[in-house]
Image: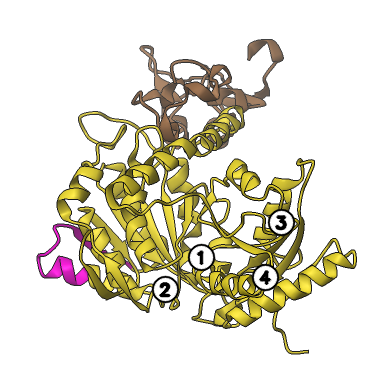
Chain colours: A yellow, B brown
């Protein structure tokens, strides 16, 4: 077992990027992502990391540089939050369509307006359909570990897709946690040097980013959709290999005390840890409560999710964003995933923790109380923005 | 592309729809966009080459007899050559279905 040291999660993330021998870092500072790239710029400036660091003029350029560098076969990294991601959004679709295995950490922060620097998931939900593989990390160790998994997965010849690692802003990014660092030798074995399938080189001319007329555009989208759907075995394989190396096994859908549970939370990101405290408290009172943590958001793990919800009476889905005019996005997808099942749980949707609003274990207990009572009374469309002052 | 886009299946596309064959844009027939085609009256032509200079698609080329002749495989029928021709030697006429 490696050394566990207290470290700010953003610094741990940057150290992981360094350990991946990334060739190009292109970023524009934005809270709460800044510490990640600040630390990387120090590592490069101090000669501790052999990489090109591009200080660009915007996030649109940050990802554009990564698209260019990745297309030449250089392992590339960027990191952003909120408005930065919004400005970058145009290029996110291009990176995935070109099948460029860029890795990006998003320190999740609310989208304006009003202006908020604090955490929720509205930023990443705005690019939900951008075609990147998307992870949600639960704690600092998870963030650190996923960087290695992301590069290995993204660069697999059968995958070739960019990966987003979602890290809750402040609640993860700025918190000092014990992190078990992995020896460089192990990383070098786990993550081989990047060998692109296709790259830009004067000796082997190819065109990337051409136009597709109506006669072929649909075929390109079908190919992209199949590519991300069929990455699932590789995702499982990557996490299995990582687990074999470190003892830390990750899964697309993780369950906590769901065996025989009647009411089960569905949560993404760092709130999984808070909710698990609430589950423990309720279990002590003899209540039949469990927790599902969605680590993988794209491709959506339909089969794993259905399996995890078998026999569950009701799901309490916590959304950290609101699709204004259409309720919570996670709940909508959960309902869609379960629609074809003969035995499906009722779904109660809470939108909670917007713009950094704290959600304590007691709040999770209140949500279960309310959902159980209302579902018992016959409410099939339970939906609430939680904790609003009336 | 080595074959028309209508013959490609999604399974055959290279990753990222990367184009592996350089310089294949010349196989792209932009000529099927047009409704009007330019017709040259050689008796009025003064060989000035303005049609050649103004053509935005570089569809005009000099032939051995000294005339600039349009390549209808690429000509989109914009009519700029006819507009710029100082002697009115080029007229735009409706392209018939069988000529396409």
**Bounds of the magenta span?**
A41-56
Residue A387 forms part of the magenta stretch: no
Q: Mark 3 and mark 2: span between their CA atoms?
A: 26 Å
Labels 3 and 2 share a subunit: yes
Horizontal placement of A47 versus A64: left or right? left
Q: Which chain does the numbered disc 4 sit on?
A: A
- Residue B60, x across and y down, in percent: 44, 25
Farthest-out residue, right: A378
Residue position marked by numbered label 2 in the rendering: A172
Q: Mark 3 and mark 1: span between their CA atoms?
A: 18 Å
Labels 3 and 4 share a subunit: yes
Q: Which of marks 3 and 1 is nearer the N terminus?
A: 1
Residue position marked by numbered label 4 in the rendering: A286
Mark 1 touches mark 2? (CB < 8 Å): yes
- Residue A278, x across and y down, in percent: 59, 74
- Residue A29, x across and y down, in percent: 35, 73
The residue located at (85%, 61%) in the rendering is A380
- Give the class, few, some or many, for how many residues have Cα within 10 Å of label 1's Cα (few <14, many ≥20): many
Q: Residue A269 carries which label?
A: 1
Helix, strand or loop under label 1 = loop
């Amino acid at each position: 077992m490696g050394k566990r040291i207290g470290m700010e999660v953003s610094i741990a993330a940057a150290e992981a990027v360094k350990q991946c021998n990334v060739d190009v870092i292109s970023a524009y500072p934005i809270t709460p992502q800044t510490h990640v790239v600040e630390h990387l710029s120090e590592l490069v400036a101090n000669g501790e990391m052999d990489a090109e660091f591009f200080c660009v003029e915007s996030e649109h350029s940050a990802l554009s540089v990564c698209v260019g560098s990745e297309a030449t076969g250089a392992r590339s990294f960027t990191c952003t939050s909120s408005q930065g991601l919004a400005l970058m959004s145009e290029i996110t679709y291009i990176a995935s369509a070109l099948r460029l295995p860029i890795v990006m950490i998003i320190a999740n922060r609310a989208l304006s307006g009003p202006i908020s620097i604090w955490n929720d998931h509205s930023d990443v939900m705005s690019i939900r359909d951008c075609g990147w593989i998307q992870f949600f990390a639960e704690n600092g160790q998870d963030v650190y570990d996923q960087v290695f998994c992301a590069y290995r997965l993204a660069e697999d010849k059968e995958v070739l897709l960019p990966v987003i690692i979602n890290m809750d802003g402040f609640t993860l990014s700025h918190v000092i946690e014990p992190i078990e660092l992995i020896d460089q030798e192990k990383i070098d074995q786990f993550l081989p040097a990047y060998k692109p399938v296709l790259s830009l080189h004067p000796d082997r001319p190819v065109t990337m980013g051409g136009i597709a007329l109506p006669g072929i555009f649909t075929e390109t989208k079908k190919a992209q959709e199949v590519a991300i759907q069929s990455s699932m075995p590789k995702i499982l394989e990557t996490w299995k290999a990582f687990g074999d190396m470190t003892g830390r096994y990750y899964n697309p859908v993780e369950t906590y005390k769901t065996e025989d549970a009647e009411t089960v939370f569905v949560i993404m990101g760092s709130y999984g840890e808070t909710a698990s405290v609430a589950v423990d408290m309720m279990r002590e009172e003899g209540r039949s409560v469990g927790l599902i943590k969605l680590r993988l958001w794209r491709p959506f793990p339909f089969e794993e999710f259905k399996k995890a919800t078998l026999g569950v009476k009701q799901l309490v889905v916590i959304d950290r964003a609101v699709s204004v005019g259409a309720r919570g996005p996670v709940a909508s997808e959960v309902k869609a995933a379960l629609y074809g099942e003969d035995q499906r749980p009722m779904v109660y949707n809470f939108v909670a923790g917007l713009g950094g609003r704290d959600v304590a274990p007691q709040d999770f207990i209140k949500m279960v109380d309310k959902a159980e009572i209302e579902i018992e009374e016959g409410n099939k469309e339970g939906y609430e923005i939680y904790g609003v002052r009336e | 592309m080595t074959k028309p886009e209508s013959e490609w299946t999604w399974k055959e596309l290279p990753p990222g729809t990367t184009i592996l064959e350089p310089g294949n844009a010349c196989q792209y027939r932009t000529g099927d966009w047009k409704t009007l085609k330019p017709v040259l009256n050689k008796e009025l032509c003064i060989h000035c080459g303005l049609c050649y200079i103004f053509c935005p698609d570089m569809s005009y080329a000099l032939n051995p007899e000294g005339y600039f002749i349009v390549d209808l495989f690429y000509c989109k029928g914009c009519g700029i050559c006819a507009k710029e021709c100082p002697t009115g030697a080029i007229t735009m006429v409706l392209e018939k279905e069988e000529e396409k």
